[in-house]
C-alpha cells in the first residue's frame, strides 16, 4: 500500500523508532507523545468523573446481572444474544475487585476507552504531528464517544481494539515489524470479543481497502493494484513463516481464552480443566463462530429484520445532531483526498471506513440506537482531524504574514470562528448530554435509559434482604410473573426477565430474593395470612388493588424506567423505607 509522507519533520531524531513503547517515547521527551499521553489522561478523568451516578440502562443492567450470576455460580458460556464475552469478563473482574456498583461495572469500559487517544500514535508514520495530536484530542473528548465510554456495552471497546488492530497491522506492513504484527494478532480477537459488530468492521475494512487500492488505479488506467498488493502480502508471509505462525498462535490463543466456557452449573466444560482441552478449543473458536452465525444471521429473521432506509436515515440525522463537525469535515476531507494530487491512503481509507459505516451498521443492528454511531464517529475522526489541522495551519499562516493584512485578518477571523464554534458545540454537547440528565431531551440516551434514580430501590432491597425468612421482592403482574424464579438464575430466560429490566441488577446486587404473582388477586390470596415481602414491584394498572392489599404500612413510588411510556410502581414497607432513606447517598424517588 502506498505511504503518505507527512511534510512536518518529526519532533526529534528518534521520534519514530521502529520498536518502542509509548512510555519509552515519552521518556525521550517526544513532545507529540507527551501531548497525546496528556490528552489520554484528561480523557480518562472525563470518563471517570461521576461514573456511577447515572442509573443503569436496560442493556447495562442485563450485563451486570449476568456478571453477578456468573460470579455466584462460577460458570460462563458465550451467548451471542448477550453480546461479546469481553464486557462480561471485565465486569466480573471489576465487580470482584470493587464490589457490585454502577461505577465498578462501568470502570473497565471507561479505562479502556481512556486509552483510545493513544491509538493515534500508531498512525504517526502517515500523519503530521499536528494531525496526530488533534486525532488524539477528538478521540478523547468527542461527546458521543465520551458518553458511551461511560456505558456498559462493547461498542467503545470494539472501537478501541478495532482501531488499534488496524494501526498495528499498518505499522507491521510499513516497518515490516514483527512486534506490531503480534500486537495486531492479539488486538483483533479482543475486538471480536467486544461486540458482534466486528462483522461490520470487517465489511467496512474490505470495502475501504478495495476503494483505496483498486478504484483509483483503475480510474488512471493502471489496474491490477489489488492483485499486486496480495502478491506482496504472500511474499512477506512466505518469507516469514515462523513469525506468521507465532502471530496465528497468538490470535488463536487469545480467541480461545476469551470465548471458551468456564465450567459450572449448566456448563459442562471449562477453560481451566486440562481434560476439557479439545472441547475448549472447539467451543472457543469454531463453536463460538457457529453460535454467532446461528443467532445473528441464520435465525435473525423475522424478529431481528427491519427496513434499512429508515435506520440509515435515523443514523444520518442523529450523527448530524451529536457529531456534526466530525461527520461533515471527515466526509469532506475523505472525498477531497480521493481527488488530490498527492495520495494519502490512510486518510482516504479510514474515511471510507466511516462513510461505509453509515450504511453498514444501521443495516446489521437490530435496534436503532445512538451507540451504533460510535463505529462511524471513531473512524471519521481521523480525516476530520486532518481537516482541522489544515484549517488551523491556514489560520496560523495567515496570522504570521505581513502583507495583505486585510485578507489575512479575514482568514484568521474565519478560522478562529470555526474553531470556536466546534469547541463550543463539543463543550455544550458534553455538558448537556454526557453529564446532563437522562431524559428525552438528551440526544445521546436511548429509550431504555431510566430517567429516575433507582438507588432508593436498591437500598430498600439491601435493608430488607437482612431478613431471610421471606422473599425480599415480589413482582406482581402478568408481564413480570414466572412460574419458577429459579428459571431466571441461568440463561436462557423468558420475556418476563426483559420486562423487569433494569431492576434485576439492583435486586441481585443488593442480595435480594424474588418471587412473583400473575396479578393482584393472586398476590392478595397468597399473603392473606402472611406478611408480604418488604418490596413489591408492579405496573401502574395494579397500583390500586395492591394499595388495598398492602395498606398504609407501605408507601408507593412511581419511577420512570424508560425515556417515555415505561413506568413501574414500587411499594416499600415504611420501616424498611425509613432505614433505606437513612443509608442511601442519593435523594429518594419522586412520588
Image (cartoon, helix red, strand yellow):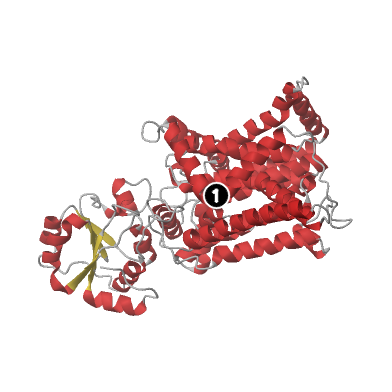
Name the residue: 43% across, 39% down: 366
Q: Is residue 290 left or right of residue 208?
A: left
Name the residue: 68% across, 32% down: 209
> Is residue 257 visible from the viewing direction of this image?
no
Q: Position of residue 445 (x, y in %)?
A: 43, 53
Q: Is residue 406 above or below residue 359?
A: below
Q: Position of residue 16 (x, y in %)?
A: 83, 52
Quadrant for the C terminus, please: bottom left
Per the image, label 1 sits on a secondary structure element best described as: loop
Quadrant for the N terminus, please: top right
Nearer to us in this view, 100 or 263: 100
Q: Disc 1 marks which residue? A: 323
Nearer to us in this view, 291 or 107: 107
Name the residue: 52% across, 53% down: 87
- Quadrant assignment, res 169: top right
Q: Is residue 488 left or right of residue 44?
A: left
Q: Is residue 458 above or below residue 387?
A: below
Give the crowd class for mark 1: few <14, some 14-19, many >=20 residues within 10 Å: many
- Quadrant assignment, res 379: top right
> Is residue 169 visible from the viewing direction of this image?
yes
Amino acid at each position: 500500500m502506498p505511504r503518505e509522507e507527512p511534510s512536518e519533520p518529526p519532533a526529534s531524531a528518534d521520534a519514530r523508532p521502529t520498536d518502542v513503547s509509548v512510555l519509552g517515547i515519552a521518556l525521550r521527551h517526544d513532545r507529540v507523545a507527551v501531548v497525546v499521553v496528556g490528552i489520554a489522561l484528561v480523557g480518562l478523568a472525563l470518563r471517570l468523573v461521576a461514573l456511577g451516578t447515572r442509573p443503569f440502562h436496560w442493556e447495562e443492567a442485563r450485563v451486570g446481572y449476568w456478571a453477578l450470576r456468573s460470579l455466584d455460580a462460577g460458570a460462563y458460556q458465550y451467548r451471542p444474544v448477550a453480546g461479546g464475552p469481553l464486557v462480561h469478563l471485565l465486569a466480573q473482574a471489576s465487580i470482584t475487585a470493587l464490589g457490585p456498583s454502577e461505577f465498578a461495572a462501568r470502570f473497565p469500559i471507561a479505562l479502556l476507552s481512556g486509552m483510545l487517544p493513544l491509538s493515534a500514535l500508531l498512525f504517526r508514520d502517515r500523519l503530521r504531528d499536528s494531525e496526530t495530536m488533534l486525532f488524539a484530542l477528538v478521540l478523547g473528548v468527542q461527546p458521543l464517544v465520551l458518553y458511551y465510554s461511560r456505558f456498559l456495552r462493547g461498542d467503545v471497546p470494539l472501537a478501541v481494539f478495532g482501531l488499534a488492530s488496524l494501526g498495528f497491522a499498518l505499522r507491521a506492513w510499513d516497518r515490516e515489524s514483527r512486534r506490531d504484527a503480534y500486537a495486531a494478532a492479539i488486538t483483533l480477537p479482543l475486538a471480536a470479543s467486544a461486540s458482534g459488530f466486528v462483522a461490520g468492521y470487517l465489511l467496512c475494512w474490505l470495502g475501504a481497502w478495495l476503494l483505496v487500492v483498486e478504484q483509483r488505479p483503475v480510474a488512471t488506467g493502471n489496474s491490477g493494484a489489488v492483485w499486486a498488493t496480495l502478491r506482496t502480502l504472500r511474499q512477506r508471509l512466505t518469507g516469514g513463516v515462523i513469525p506468521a505462525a507465532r502471530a496465528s498462535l497468538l490470535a488463536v490463543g487469545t480467541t480461545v481464552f476469551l470465548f471458551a466456557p468456564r465450567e459450572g452449573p449448566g456448563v459442562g466444560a471449562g477453560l481451566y480443566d486440562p481434560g476439557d482441552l479439545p472441547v475448549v478449543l472447539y467451543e472457543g473458536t469454531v463453536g463460538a463462530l457457529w453460535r454467532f452465525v446461528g443467532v445473528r444471521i441464520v435465525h435473525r429473521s423475522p424478529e431481528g429484520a427491519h427496513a434499512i432506509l429508515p435506520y440509515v436515515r435515523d443514523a444520518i440525522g442523529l450523527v448530524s445532531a451529536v457529531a456534526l463537525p466530525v461527520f461533515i469535515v471527515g466526509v469532506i476531507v475523505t472525498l477531497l483526498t480521493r481527488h488530490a494530487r498527492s495520495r494519502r491512503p490512510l486518510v482516504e481509507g479510514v474515511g471510507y471506513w466511516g462513510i461505509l459505516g453509515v450504511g453498514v451498521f444501521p443495516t446489521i443492528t437490530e435496534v436503532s440506537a445512538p451507540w451504533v454511531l460510535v463505529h462511524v464517529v471513531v473512524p471519521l475522526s481521523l480525516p476530520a482531524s486532518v481537516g482541522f489541522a489544515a484549517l488551523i495551519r491556514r489560520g496560523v499562516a495567515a496570522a504570521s504574514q505581513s502583507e495583505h493584512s486585510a485578507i489575512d485578518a479575514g482568514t484568521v477571523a474565519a478560522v478562529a470562528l470555526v474553531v470556536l464554534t466546534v469547541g463550543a458545540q463539543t463543550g455544550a454537547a458534553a455538558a448537556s448530554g454526557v453529564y446532563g440528565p437522562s431524559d428525552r431531551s438528551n440526544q445521546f440516551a436511548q429509550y431504555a435509559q431510566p430517567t429516575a434514580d433507582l438507588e432508593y430501590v436498591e437500598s430498600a432491597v439491601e435493608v430488607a434482604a437482612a431478613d431471610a425468612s421471606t422473599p425480599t421482592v415480589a413482582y406482581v403482574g402478568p408481564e413480570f410473573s414466572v412460574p419458577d424464579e429459579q428459571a431466571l438464575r441461568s440463561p436462557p430466560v423468558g420475556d418476563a426477565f426483559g420486562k423487569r429490566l433494569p431492576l434485576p441488577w439492583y435486586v441481585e446486587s443488593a442480595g435480594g430474593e424474588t418471587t412473583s404473582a400473575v396479578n393482584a388477586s393472586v398476590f392478595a390470596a397468597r399473603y392473606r395470612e402472611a406478611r408480604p415481602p418488604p418490596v413489591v414491584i408492579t405496573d401502574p394498572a395494579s397500583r390500586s388493588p395492591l394499595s388495598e392489599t398492602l395498606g398504609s404500612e407501605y408507601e408507593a413510588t412511581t419511577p420512570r424506567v424508560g425515556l417515555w411510556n415505561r413506568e413501574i410502581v414500587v411499594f416499600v414497607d415504611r420501616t424498611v423505607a425509613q432505614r433505606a432513606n437513612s443509608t442511601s447517598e442519593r435523594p429518594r424517588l419522586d412520588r
